[in-house]
């Protein structure tokens, strides 16, 4: 089973395309943010033996940038993808509340029971986050890196710390930042080694 799990959120979208709900749409990545992932390398106290990446291009580009330094080829893991926001994808909150006012009100009202119009339901997303977390943490590889998205990483922080998933908004993963968990020696759970580390 995995003993160390590193998590990196993808590099930032270009300036002007941030502060939006990016799910399955591809906003691209900022070149400086992508290059900045090299600053994460000294923080890996053990080299990953495997790198898993979301299939979305902003994550895959980030995984490729890191993997090259470790002479590894990232493995695409479809369930590491961000929430499918459906009709909300690529929109700011102001645009959502204007163009989809009824659905925006339903989201505010229903919270974790909400189903994004023409997208994914929140319960399905959380089930997926749990499923891929269990699969990766039980993998044979001892040191794992997962390159993913803010929603997945926040949910994983709750799973590692045995917190209810509704508390995931307490964690706000930063772009191109590294978070790490290590399995306790007695096998009783996990410890957060660091969160949102950048240089």
Image (cartoon, rainbow, N blue to C red):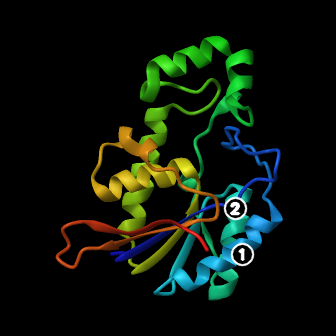
Q: Is residue 165 above or below residue 3?
A: above
Q: To which residue does mark 1 refer?
A: 65
11 sits to left or right of 194: right
Q: Residue furthest top?
A: 102
Q: Earlier in the sequence, mark 1 or mark 2?
A: 2
Relative image position of residue 14 (x, y in whole percent) = 81, 53
Q: Is residue 119 above or below residue 130?
A: above
Q: Nearer the viewer, residue 174 or 155?
A: 174
Q: Dots 1 and 2: beta carbons under 8 Å?
A: yes
Q: Quadrant of the N terminus?
A: bottom left
Residue at 65% x, 60% y: name it: 10
Q: Quadrant of residue 30?
A: bottom right
Relative image position of residue 34 (x, y in whole percent) = 74, 68
Disc 1 to disc 2, how far (Cα)? 10 Å
Relative image position of residue 162 (x, y in whole percent) = 27, 53
Residue at 72% x, 58% y: name it: 58
73 sits to left or right of 168: right
């Amino acid at each position: 089973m995995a003993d160390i799990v590193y998590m990196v959120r993808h590099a930032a979208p270009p300036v002007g395309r941030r502060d939006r709900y990016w799910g399955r749409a591809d906003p691209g990545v900022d070149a400086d943010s992508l290059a900045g992932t090299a600053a994460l390398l000294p923080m890996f106290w053990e080299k990953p033996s495997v790198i898993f990446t979301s299939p979305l291009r902003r994550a895959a580009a980030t995984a490729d940038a890191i993997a090259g330094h470790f002479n590894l080829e990232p493995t695409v893991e479809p369930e590491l993808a961000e929430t499918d926001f459906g009709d909300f994808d690529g929109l700011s909150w102001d645009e959502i509340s204007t163009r989809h006012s009824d659905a925006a009100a339903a989201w505010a009202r229903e919270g974790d029971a909400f189903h994004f119009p023409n997208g994914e339901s929140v319960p399905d997303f959380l089930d997926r986050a749990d499923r891929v977390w269990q699969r990766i943490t039980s993998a044979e590889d001892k040191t794992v890196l997962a390159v993913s998205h803010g929603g997945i990483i926040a949910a994983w922080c709750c799973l590692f710390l045995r917190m209810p998933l509704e508390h995931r908004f307490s964690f706000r993963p930063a772009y191109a930042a590294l978070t790490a968990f290590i399995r306790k020696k007695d096998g009783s759970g996990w410890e957060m080694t660091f969160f949102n580390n950048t240089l």
